[in-house]
Amino acid sequence: MNSLYALTTVLIIYAIGDFVSAKTKAIFSMLFVSSAIFLIGFWNGLPLTIFEDAALLKIGAILIALLITHMGTLMNIGQLKAQWKTVIIALGAVVGIGVFLFLVGSPILGKEYAVTAAPPISGGVVAALIMGEAAKAKGLETIVVFTTLLVVVQGFLGYPIASICLNKESNRIKMLYKDGKLETDNGDNNIESRPKYRIIPPLPENLQTTFIYLAKLSIVAVIGFKLAELTNGIVNKYVMCLIVGIISREIGLLEENIMTKANGFGLGMVALMAVIFANLTKATPQMVLDLLWPLIGSLLLGSVGIALTSLILGKVLGYTKEMAIAIGISSLFGFPGTFIISNEVANAVGETDEERKIILNQILPKMLVAGFITVTIASVVLAGVMSKMI
C-alpha cells in the first residue's frame, strides 16, 4: 500500500476509536475499538503490512524509550512514595493470576494451557516470549501459537474492564472534589508541580525549542539504557528509563511533560500504538477458532484471579474496589494502555480543566506504577518460575 494511504487509513481508524471513546465516555476505549476494527479489517483484506507501509513500526519501536522516559516526567517523588499500596496490589494481582490459573485452570483447561497462560496474561510480550521458548523446546507448537494469541487479544478483555472501573472511580473523585471532601495520597493535587530537588536551572525561553527538548529527552533515555546494561539485565531497560525520567525531572534536567512541550507526543503515540496493533496481524480466524476455548477460559480465570486478589488487598489497604481492580487488570495491557485509558477517562468525566487535572492526578500515577510492576517486572519473574512447570 502507498505509504500516505496506509498512514491515512491508520489515522482514520485511530480517529474512529477516539470518537467512540468520547461518545461512550471511555467505557469503550480507543484501544479497544481500534483493536476490533484492525482485527476485523485484517480478516477482510486490510493489508497485513499496513503499519510497515505507513513507516510506523521502526519509529514506534525507537520511541518507546523516549515515551517511557517522558512518562517519568509526569510523576514526582511525592507521588511515587505514595504508591506503595499500588505496588502491593499489582504484585498481588500477578500472584493471583498464577495461583488461580494453576489450581483452578489446570483441571479445566489442562495443565499446559493453564501454566503457559499465566505469565502472558500478567505481562504480555516478554513473558509470552519466555513461555513460548519453553514450549517450543518441548515441541509444543500449539502452545507457542497460544502464547502469541494471548498477547494479541488480552486487551479486548482488559481495556473495557479498566475503562469501566476507572470511569466509576473518576466520577467518585469528581463528586468528592465538588463537595470539598477529596483526600489525596499523592501530595500536591496539582499535577504540574515544580521540581522538588532542582539543581539545574530552567532553560532560557529562547532555548525552549522542540529540538532541544527532544535532544535532552533522548540523551536521558540513552543514559537509562546504559545504566540498565550495568545491572546485567537485572533491571529492565524501560524500567530504568522511567526511573531516570523521574530523577531528571526532579533535578531540573528534563521539563515536566516534556514530549508534549516539544510537540512530539501525539505523533509518538501514533507510532507506538502501531507497534501494539501490529500483533493483530498474527491472529488468523482459524487460529482464534482452534484455540477459542483455552483462550477465553484462561483470560476469564486469570481475570477472576486478578479481581479476587485485588479486591482483598484493596480493601485491606483502603482503595475502592474499582481502583483496586483497575490496578490489577492493568496486567492485561500495561503501557501505553495505562496512560491512554487514564487520560481518556479523565477527559470524559471531568467537566473543567481543573477537574480533569484532579482526576488524572488521582488515577494516573497508580495506573502507571501498576502497569510497570505487573507487565515489566512481576510477569517476567512469574514466567521464569512457570516456564519450568510446562
Image (cartoon, rainbow, N blue to C red):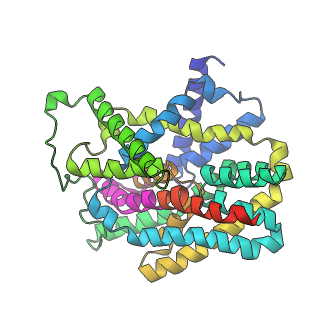
Residue in view at x 84 percent, y 51 percent: 139
Image side of residue 344 versus residue 140, left or right: left
Q: Which image quarter is the C terminus in?
A: bottom right
Q: Is residue 224 above or below residue 315?
A: above
User: Where residue 204 sits: x, y (%)?
Assistant: 13, 33
Overall secondary structure of the magenta section? helix
User: Where residue 303 sits: x, y (%)?
Assistant: 64, 67
Q: What's drawn in magenta, residue-wise?
A: 347-370
365 inside magenta stretch? yes
Image side of residue 20 versus residue 304, left or right: left
Whether residue 299 is visible, yes or no, is: no
Q: Is residue 312 above or below residue 239?
A: below
Q: Is residue 120 above or below residue 57?
A: below
Image side of residue 59 versus residue 102, left or right: left
Residue furthest to the top: 2
Residue in view at x 78 percent, y 62 percent: 113
Residue in view at x 77 percent, y 36 percent: 43
Number of numbered markers: 0
Residue in view at x 38 percent, y 38 percent: 222
Q: Which image quarter is the N terminus in?
A: top right
The one of 356 and 74 positioned closer to us in this rendering: 74
Whether residue 280 is visible, yes or no, is: yes
User: Where residue 354 sits: x, y (%)?
Assistant: 28, 55
User: Where residue 319 sits: x, y (%)?
Assistant: 43, 75
The one of 381 and 193 positioned closer to us in this rendering: 381
Image side of residue 274 versus residue 146, left or right: left
The one of 192 and 168 positioned closer to us in this rendering: 192
The quadrant holding residue 14 is top right
351 inside magenta stretch? yes
Q: Is residue 64 above or below residue 49?
A: below
